[in-house]
Image: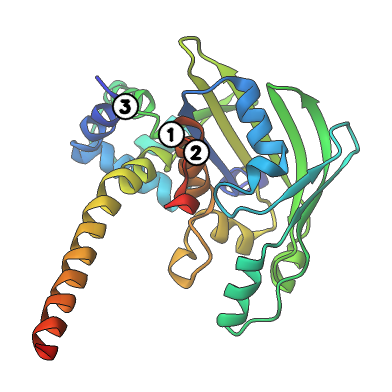
Amino acid sequence: MTTGTETRVTTQVYRVYIKALPQAIWDAITKREWTERYGYAAPVEYDLRPGGRFRAFSTDAMKAAREQMGGPPAPDVIGDGEVLELDPPRRLVQTWRMLMDPETAAEGFTRLTYEIADTGHGVTKLTVTHELEGAPRLASFLSGAMEDVGAGGGWSWTLSDLKSLLETGSSFHDA
Amino acid sequence: MTDDDRVFKALADPTRRLLLDRLFERDGRTLTELESGLEMTRFGVMKHLRVLEDADLVVTRRSGREKLHFLNPVPIRLIHDRWIDKYRERQVSALADLKHELEQEDTA
């Protein structure tokens, strides 16, 4: 088996169509007042220029859940990375590392690409490509395989919730 | 057809479910890899993949000269979140009502 084959196995691709403008989706990804309202609800901080820093922070709910599970306390910064390319509101490429626990932190930086394409008729196509070479634990978490142990449903859960938030104004958090 | 209709139609075929299972086991495969071991022409497999792509259950990406197929679980998740959770909630609330009823009787 060639290295190329191994590499492609570790990439995850997710796509969702959302009745919203590309700018609304861009904002929902990059602005904390939006990221706090869907999926893992982690507030984010983006310095939106090439080389700019990205950070995601833990919430009180995450810290409480972590305490309940008896794990080590959740750190204040749960994810970080660097903006590599950006073309608002169409494309964002960044590195992404999860710092939630020492094992995922040790897997290091992965590459995450958001592509936002207007399809006309007020519907926007959002494609998330996450290159997870050398990060099997993070890959498992993001695929939703750890949902039963309280780790959330990963990307498909997050994107389903994002769609629900932008189309109906409410998400799982409001339920 | 609505998005949900396309997903249900795509899932209502054993070959297409098998193709999704193969991608679940190992994602990012070429057509050649996907058709191996299937008793079907390349054209037949392509037709099934087209239906899966139309339903967005499969997303393709170019990698050099190869076209790779990825399983996109989001449409199934959307059906899960909108339909299955709804019925589960109803069951849970029915049980909660029953508990409430029984406890009322106890105290009466």
Task: Residue type at mark 2: give it.
Answer: Leu
**Numbered badge on residue B3:** 3
Residue farthest top in this picture: A120
Image location (x, y in percent) of residue B90: 20, 58
- The correct choice, above or below, for B93 with respect to B20 in the image is below
* Residue lying at the far right of the rendered structure: A51
Q: Say whether residue A166 is left or right of residue A48.
A: left
| Circle on res. A96 | none
Nearest the viewer among B95 and A116 is B95
Residue B27 location (% of width, % of height): 49, 45
The amino acid on which the numbered mark 1 sits, given as a three-letter code, is: Thr
C-alpha separation, residue under disc 1 versus residue under disc 2: 6 Å
Q: Residue at x 17, y 78 (%)?
A: B99
Would residue B3 appear left or right of A83 to someone viewing this image?
left
Q: Amino acid at mark 3?
A: Asp
Q: Residue B45: x percent and y percent? A: 30, 28
- For disc 2, the marked residue is A165
SS category of the residue bearing label 3: helix
User: Is residue A113 toward the left or the right of residue B78 in the image?
Assistant: right
Q: Which residue is mark 1?
A: A168
